């Protein structure tokens, strides 16, 4: 799997852990989302502006394979990447590594591009497609 971005270092908060002292499984999706937003921001792509321009990006599919648990106070990074240019859906691959570079989990999330007025699928905005083509070294 190829990754084009690595998030800022994150740290597990106590409220994110369960009775066993492990990060609750639902929080990994939040970590993925935080990294996705950070990456898009660095690429100059604003979720807020896309929504203001009538494009929604709901999650339509998720998959995570857990290898090792994160625990309170652990530090980690989230790697994010894409394998193909989005058409009507954006498929993002993720991997979480501990500060010691141990692979914690990996997965993917599928987001659909929807028209905000009628909630019908639409093509990915040209600006987004152009940016992703550049980072994937596509020739125009």
Image: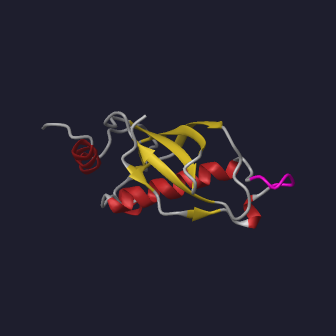
Image point 34% across, 37% down: which residue? 86
The answer to whether 12 appears left or right of 139 in the picture is right
In the image, residue 9 lies at what x, y percent?
52, 63
Image point 51% across, 46% down: which residue? 58
| Image colouring | secondary structure
In the image, residue 101 lies at what x, y percent?
54, 50
The answer to whether 59 appears left or right of 6 in the picture is right
Up the image or down, 42 lies above or below 62; here it is: below
The answer to whether 126 appears left or right of 105 in the picture is left
**Quarter of the C terminus within the rendering:** top left
Image point 50% across, 43% down: which residue? 94
**Quarter of the N terminus within the rendering:** top left
Dominant secondary structure of the residues highlighted in magenta in the image: loop
Residue 77 in the magenta stretch? The answer is: no
| Numbered range of the magenta stretch | 18-22
In the image, residue 11 lies at what x, y percent?
62, 64
**Can see residue 136?**
yes
Residue 21 in the magenta stretch? The answer is: yes
**Can see residue 52?**
no
Given residues 73 and 53, the one toward you in this image is 73
């Amino acid at each position: 799997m190829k990754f084009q971005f690595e998030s800022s270092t994150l740290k597990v908060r106590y409220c994110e852990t369960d009775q066993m002292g492990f990060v609750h499984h639902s929080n990994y999706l939040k970590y993925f989302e935080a990294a996705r937003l950070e990456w898009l921001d660095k690429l100059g792509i604003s979720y807020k502006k896309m929504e203001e321009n009538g494009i929604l990006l709901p999650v339509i599919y998720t998959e995570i394979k857990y290898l090792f648990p994160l625990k309170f106070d652990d530090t980690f990074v989230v790697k994010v990447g894409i394998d193909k240019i989005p058409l009507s859906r954006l498929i993002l691959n993720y991997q979480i590594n501990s500060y010691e570079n141990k692979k914690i989990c990996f997965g993917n999330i599928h987001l659909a591009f929807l028209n905000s007025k009628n909630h019908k699928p639409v093509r990915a905005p040209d600006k987004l497609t152009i940016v992703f083509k550049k980072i994937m070294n596509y020739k125009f």
